[in-house]
Image: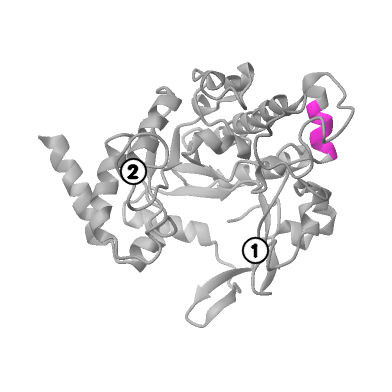
Amino acid sequence: FNTTAVDQVKRMDVWGSSGYVYYERTETWDYLQAFIDAARSQGLKVHASVNTFVGGYLCPYNLGSDGILFRDDSKKEWASVANLADGLTNTMDLLNDETDYGAKFLNPANDDVQNFVLQLLGDLAKYDLDGIILDRCRYDDYGLESDFSAVSKQKFEEYIGETVAHFPEDIMAPGTDKIPSDQPAYFKKWLEFRVKVIHDFIVKAREKVKSVNSEINFGVYVGAWYSSYYTSGVNWASPKYDTSAYYPKWATIDYKNYGYADHLDYIFLGAYASVDKIYGSGEWTMEGFCKNGRELLKGDVPFSGGPDIGNGTGWTNGGQAAKIPDAIDACINNSDGFFAFDLCHIKMYDYWSAFKTGFDNYLESVQK
């Protein structure tokens, strides 16, 4: 889309008929506007989803890389710093395409990063959109090992009003990727700080979008696995949900203050259970994910749960049309809607009629 914040991506890695290749874009017409025009002609609403804190992508199989972190060496300090077993490491120094490929994340605590993303969102909100959805509005895929940059250390010390004498050991020992049995002094406070960073950015992002067009809905996509989502630095629950009462091992009493559900117009929960775990209670069943989501969100925001029908266990090779109506039933009756990841999988596996059956079943049940 058109923005003054950064150059547009001119190529994209694609699995096509000739294998895994780059497709180069030489045209200059506005892709997003063309998509909006086509959608409006069909009476469809349009919601734009953004890879919020991703600044680059390293492709596997020696295909190469793209994104601002790769195009602009001066932005290296924007990249996430991981607390690895062999020391603090800027993720732009991890570039083995066999082990380090994939998304390269920006540091959410960096003010320059936040201002950059806010400028992108401001330009996106100029389009005739019904909504803007933030995806990957979180910390790096390195989880608890991210982010341990000098910027994050300084902001954390400002937050707690203390100096961390031994960094990162007083927070997490190098290489920590799960809750340690013997928690360092600032472990839980650090987790609280991280969710505050994301919470405060959500507030700023909403304000930016609404300042450009107050009619655009503002929402996020998150994984529904709340019990472990703290590793991403996100508290997507309502601030009325007392996290520490249920998860005292990693949540402080103040953790709940940074639940951001009340700042959203809607939220999408990835209820990504395996194909044989549709009905049930608790996490890792589709029904359980959605029921849990209602308890966590406390009515602050409407939400839609849905499955991953292309990558989830048992879903990857298609042939699961018979399961689609049950997945719709389990999610749509326990949330405020339904979504599926991803449209390309519906097309790939020809699930259209299965989806129609599922929605027809739902409409028939509510009309009785």
Residue at 76 percent of width and 28 percent of height: 184
* Foreground of the two, 218 or 345: 345
Q: Quarter of the image containing the N terminus? A: bottom right
Residue at 34 percent of width and 47 percent of height: 277
> Residue 131 lies in magenta, yes or no?
no
Is residue 362 found left or right of 233 in the rendered image? left
* Foreground of the two, 15 or 218: 15
* Label at residue 338: 2
Q: Quarter of the image containing the C terminus? A: top left
Q: In which quarter of the view is residue 333 placed? A: top left
Crowding at dot 1, Cα within 10 Å, few <14 / some 14-19 / many 20+, comes out as: few
Alpha carbon separation for disc pair 1 and 2:
31 Å
Residue at 40 percent of width and 23 percent of height: 299
Q: In which quarter of the view is residue 11 placed? A: bottom right
What secondary structure is marked by label 2?
Answer: loop
In the image, residue 167 sits, relative to residue 5, either above or below, namely above
In the image, residue 274 sits, relative to residue 30, either above or below, namely above
> Residue 153 lies in magenta, yes or no?
yes
Going by the picture, which residue comes out furthest to the bottom?
18
In the image, residue 68 sits, relative to residue 64, either above or below, namely above
Say which residue label 1 marks.
9
Is residue 24 found left or right of 306 in the rendered image? right
Percent position of residue 182, x then y: 72, 29
Magenta stretch?
150-156
Of circles 1 and 2, which is in front? 2
Mark 1 and mark 2 lie on one chain; the one further toward the N terminus is: 1
Is residue 80 found left or right of 26 in the rendered image? right
Look at the magenta stretch and give its main secondary structure: helix
The kind of residue tagged 2 is Phe
